[in-house]
Image: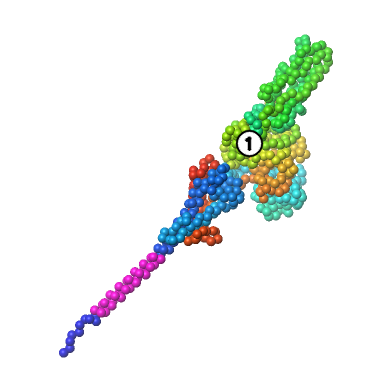
Amino acid sequence: MNKLRKDEGASLILAILIVTTISLVVVALLTQGSSSLRVTLAVRSVADSSYSADGAAQIAINNLRAGTGFGSNPNEAGFNNGNDGAGCFGNSVGLGNTDNLPLSSSFYTPYGSGGGNSAYVQCTPETGTGAQGSPVIISSTNKPGQAILTLDTTNSDGLDFGHSSETNTVHGSVTSDSGLQVKNNSSLNVTGTGVSINANSATGGCQQAVQVNGVNTPCGTTSIPDPNYAAPSVTPAFPATPTCPTSNNGPEIFYPGVYTMTPDTAGVGSQTITITVSSGSAGTFTPTLTAPTGYPVATAQAWNVTPAAMQTSLRNSWGIPVTVTGTQTTATVAGSYAITFPGVLGTTPALTVAGVGLGVGKTVTRSTTTAGKASCAPTTVGWYYFAPQDSVTTGVYYFNWSGSWGLSGTAVGGTLATNKLGTTAGGSTIAPAGNALAPTQPGACVNPIKDPNAVGDEFVFGGTAQLHPSSTSLKEFCATYNGTTSIPTVVYGLKSSVGTAPAPVVPAQSTCVVNSGCAMITISNGDHAVIYFEGFVYAPRAYITLDVNNATQPFFNFGLITNTLHLGQTGSGCGTCAYINLPDNSLGYGQVSTIVDLTVYLCPGAASCTPASGAVALKARVQLYDSTGTPVAGQRGVNILSWSEQR
């Protein structure tokens, strides 16, 4: 009899199935957990790198905001892309170079890690921002089209250059409406669209002598007409008397108006006062006074000599030789008469000429030696300031003298940049009539493209007035920026006379100034002149000759238009800097806004980091904003313009 089978085998199979299923589930869960852990670790590593890079950039930005690194520099409180060689973090890295901020592994410690990440931040300022930039928007509407334009068409060469096998560097395009001559194996290196000449009068040699951005380039052929910029609308008038410094070595201040003698003339001996004797009561006479052409006539025995007729010397005594002529109408003339100089020229004794008796109908001629006073005596003049008309109006100075102005001392015209002028004996405030130290470096007056609120001067040349700086002391004149459609002009050469008699009349430029016999402006290499025109020069009838030595920045910083021009440059204190410069178009960042590019290199787990040992983890562009244009530590605005992590 067979026994019935039990179900032990089935239970075993079921158990095996359950165990197998559970095993598979457990293995799957364990595999999933391992993958999740690996992903978690990878994500955490990426986050650590991201946090490290962010932290390094934030440290760099905070250093820029707080002026960290500038504590040992009493003249600065933070980086503003200046021309002083100090980089973003206060290191002396050289003009325009990248500054670096190394961060050791202690600056950031990743979560759960025994070691930290190190980083290295490179900071590169954007050209054209900060102290190197312009707060004024520059475009073709408010600057001339050429760095140089010569308008002469009668000579074969309106532009010639060359001094001693040098390279003459000009920033901007150059056009000669006649030809171009090369001297002494020199070359002309320009930017922009290059050099163009009038094909009908070109003289050859141009192709090998001209470079565009350092590459030999043939001249183009074109001509550009005179743009006919208008003369100043200010009516010529005699200026106020110069203000003497209140203590030794301060500036003597000049004021806008007509100058018929150079401001630093040693005297005014060429002026002659003529008195015609007329009849009077017995024993006396009342002279009729006549003045040199262009000067007002007073009555009686006092000629109220205006400042223009008696513009005093800056550093010597002045005087007038007086000749008295006329016909005596009485047998005797008793007593004497006097020419009285006005009080505006200082305390001056009256000039007296004794009466004479030569008989009726005889000619009376008497001469006297000089009479006058020392300029600003006993105060010693340290330098000369040419003031604007007022805080908002350009100071227009009309020059109408015979001969050349040597300008041998330190002179500044336009809104003063006080940070370049030293201090007074009593404190840090600069007062032009006080004991302000004479400036010694460019930037003494405010460049018109760096401050739309700056007010400058315009020097208007008429007749045969010439300028020939003759010393190494600083001379800098700034124009006024009047808006987005007006070119800031610092020098203007008259094409027609201005003014109406009997008020002063300033004639158009004439004689040798317009026929290359003498130059309106002469800069001689041997004089080593340090002169800067921060504005446009427009002299369509005049000749200008420039031979400069060791140029350290542009002598002419807004381009020039002239009839004919000579260029010559020997050496340069700044490599290939242009000493005639046409500003590039600018968005107008200026001193109030400094933009820097930050590049963060990261070295995970390393004690230190360099660009060679690390990898780029982040790039950012940061704008620093200073409301006054001067950094104030801890009070600078910061805008993040871009922030890009690198993978």
Q: Residues within 10 Å of mark 1 (few under 14, many from 20)?
A: some
Residue lying farthest bottom? 1
Residue lying farthest top? 282
Q: From what the image shows, is residue 33 above or below residue 101?
A: below
23 inside magenta stretch = yes
- Residue 130 at x, y percent in the picture: 56, 45
Quarter in which the N terminus is drawn: bottom left
- Residue 587 at x, y percent in the picture: 56, 46
- Residue 460 at x, y percent in the picture: 68, 35
Considering depth in this image, is 18 or 51 the residue closer to the camera?
A: 51
What is the number of callouts on the image?
A: 1
Q: From what the image shows, is residue 224 above or below residue 339?
A: below
- The span picked out in magenta is 11-38
User: Which residue occupies 69% across, 28% down?
Assistant: 375
Left or right of 443 in this view: 178: right
User: Which residue occupies 78% across, 16% down?
Assistant: 354
Considering depth in this image, is 287 or 543 the residue closer to the camera?
A: 287
Left or right of 129 in this view: 251: right
Considering depth in this image, is 550 or 276 the residue closer to the camera?
A: 550
Name which residue type carries label 1. Answer: Leu
Q: From what the image shows, is residue 66 above or below residue 248?
A: below
User: Which residue occupies 54% across, 42% down?
Assistant: 630
The rendered magenta stretch, by its main secondary structure, is classed as helix
340 inside magenta stretch = no
Q: Which residue is mark 1?
A: 437
User: Which residue occupies 64% across, 45% down?
Assistant: 582
Query: Can residue 26 be seen here?
Result: yes
Query: Can residue 563 be seen here?
Result: no
Residue lying farthest left? 1
Q: Quadrant of residue 499?
A: top right
Q: Secondary structure at mark 1?
A: loop
- Residue 637 at x, y percent in the picture: 49, 45
